């Protein structure tokens, strides 16, 4: 039977303390005990249903984690204060000094910087590869490699990872496959194709209202227990804990994620078709011209579409900036980083979210100066939006 992630979320039902239709928020950083022995057992993780301290766990965070694990089809999940607060402990947990990571070269700039400049301080080296070429990926694996890292759909180039193929490589070489699924929630379920660990920046589509940062690691109970271990767990000890009030608010927003993803995908697909037909260099996994269109199609939970992100090439950075400023002036969206908002957001990744990647490497991976990344909003009449965007493009000379 098809995996139905939104149904899994819908089937989760929680009631609040007084019969509320939403679960009560645990507005406490610490918890009291009648017995000192139970307190000790809780600290050791041996007292089910008891809470000690909200960096360790809290009811609100557990509810949200449970919903995200249900969505991704993993045993459990651990929420964190940001997407980076999910990515960094996972990699530090999986690798010791002297070990090695093979990562896609097209990943979010912060992840790239962490791998290249930060975790390398602990003698954990990373080889960046073209993740779409499984031979190249395998050739980069050494006897010290512990992790294969990629984004299901990459930021910002929208490369699509062959999760099944990567998982086979991971199994063959005894590695963990870690997949950041921030760009394709519901559309792609990486665990179904063999990802060991699935990560999201909740800041984006999942929360969807651009009012908070958050992250999650979805995986096995064993791995999440490792991350939370009070003596050796990277999430526990590095301490990027999500606040309970935020967890409760993200959980409420998750209830509409399926509707939002369908509309984001519909609108992005409509614009991508039109922009391409107008002669713009357009990248969107739903376009037949996308090199991994069929791969995405073979993995996707079809009802959620190909996602809300597309890119166009405006030719030069100057033209890209002029166009974005004009579109913002016309109230077609915001010149802003991030994604998954009700309103369209656009930015020029080379000088913003991927600026951590040196210019030479940006060129090698195909990240051009004039690239504009669009996170397409929930516009009710996308045809109207298209005509208004097109007139901006004609005005600044991106289209004639
Ligand atoms: N992963 C991807 C694909 C992202 O685009 C981002 C942020 O833009 C992150 C991770 C980091 O998430 P956060 O900003 O919530 O730490």
Image: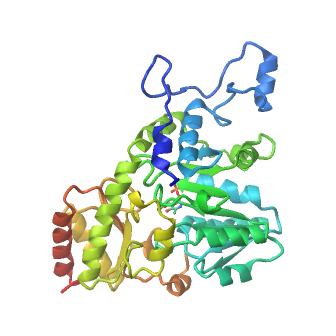
Pick out the residue farthest to the front.
Answer: 1
Q: Quarter of the image for the C terminus: give it.
A: bottom left
**Occupied quadrant, residue 101:** bottom right
Pick out the residue farthest to the top.
Answer: 34
Is 242 above or below relative to 293? above
Q: How many tags in the picture?
A: 0
**Occupied quadrant, residue 148:** bottom right
Q: Residue at x 80, y 26 (%)?
A: 41
Is 264 above or below relative to 289? above
- Apparent side of residue 32 relative to residue 151 in the rendered image (left or right): right
Whether residue 395 can be seen here = yes
Q: How is the image coloured?
A: rainbow
Q: Position of residue 346 (x, y in %)?
A: 34, 66
**Occupied quadrant, residue 368:** bottom left
- Apparent side of residue 221 relative to residue 264 in the rendered image (left or right): right
Q: Position of residue 108 (x, y in %)?
A: 53, 67
Is 196 above or below relative to 38? below
Q: Residue at x 23, y 82 (%)?
A: 278
Q: Residue at x 31, y 75 (%)?
A: 321
Q: Position of residue 367 (x, y in %)?
A: 46, 81
Is 236 above or below relative to 122? above
Q: Position of residue 50 (x, y in %)?
A: 69, 24
- In-front residue for pair 329/145: 145
- In-front residue for pair 138/78: 138
Whether residue 210 can be seen here = no
């Amino acid at each position: 039977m098809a995996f139905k992630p939104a149904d899994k979320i819908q089937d989760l039902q929680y009631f609040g303390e007084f019969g509320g239709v939403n679960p009560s928020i645990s507005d406490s950083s610490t918890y009291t005990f009648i017995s000192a022995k139970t307190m000790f057992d809780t600290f050791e993780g041996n007292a089910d249903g008891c809470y000690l301290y909200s960096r360790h766990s809290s009811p609100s965070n557990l509810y949200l984690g449970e919903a995200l694990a249900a969505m991704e089809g993993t045993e459990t999940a651990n929420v964190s204060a940001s997407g980076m607060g999910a990515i960094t402990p996972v990699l530090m947990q999986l690798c010791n000094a002297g070990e090695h990571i093979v990562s896609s070269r097209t990943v979010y700039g912060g992840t790239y910087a962490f791998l290249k400049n930060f975790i390398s301080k602990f003698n954990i080296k990373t080889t960046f590869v073209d993740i779409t070429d499984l031979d190249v990926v395998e050739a980069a694996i050494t006897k010290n490699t512990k992790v294969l890292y990629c984004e299901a759909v990459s930021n910002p180039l929208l490369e699509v990872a062959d999760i099944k193929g990567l998982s086979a490589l991971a199994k063959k070489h005894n590695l963990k496959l870690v997949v950041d699924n921030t760009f394709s929630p519901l559309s792609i379920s990486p665990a179904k194709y063999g990802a060991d660990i699935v990560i999201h920046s909740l800041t984006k589509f999942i929360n969807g209202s651009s009012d908070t940062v958050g992250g999650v690691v979805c995986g096995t109970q064993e791995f999440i227990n490792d991350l939370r271990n009070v003596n050796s767990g990277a999430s526990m000890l590095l301490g990027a804990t999500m606040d309970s009030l935020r967890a409760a608010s993200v959980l409420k927003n998750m209830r509409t994620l399926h509707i939002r993803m369908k509309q984001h995908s519909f609108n992005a697909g409509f614009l991508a078709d039109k922009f391409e037909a107008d002669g713009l260099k357009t990248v969107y996994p739903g376009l037949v011209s996308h090199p991994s269109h069929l791969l995405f199609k073979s993995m996707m939970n079809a009802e959620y579409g190909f996602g809300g992100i597309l890119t166009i090439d405006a030719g030069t950075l100057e033209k890209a900036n002029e166009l974005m400023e004009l579109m913002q002036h016309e109230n077609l969206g915001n010149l802003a980083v991030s994604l998954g908002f009700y309103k369209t957001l656009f930015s020029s990744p080379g000088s913003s979210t991927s600026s951590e990647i040196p210019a030479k490497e940006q060129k090698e991976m195909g990240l051009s100066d004039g690239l504009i990344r669009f996170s397409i909003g929930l516009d009710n009449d996308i045809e109207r939006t298209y005509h208004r965007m097109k007139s901006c493009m004609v005005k600044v000379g991106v289209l004639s």
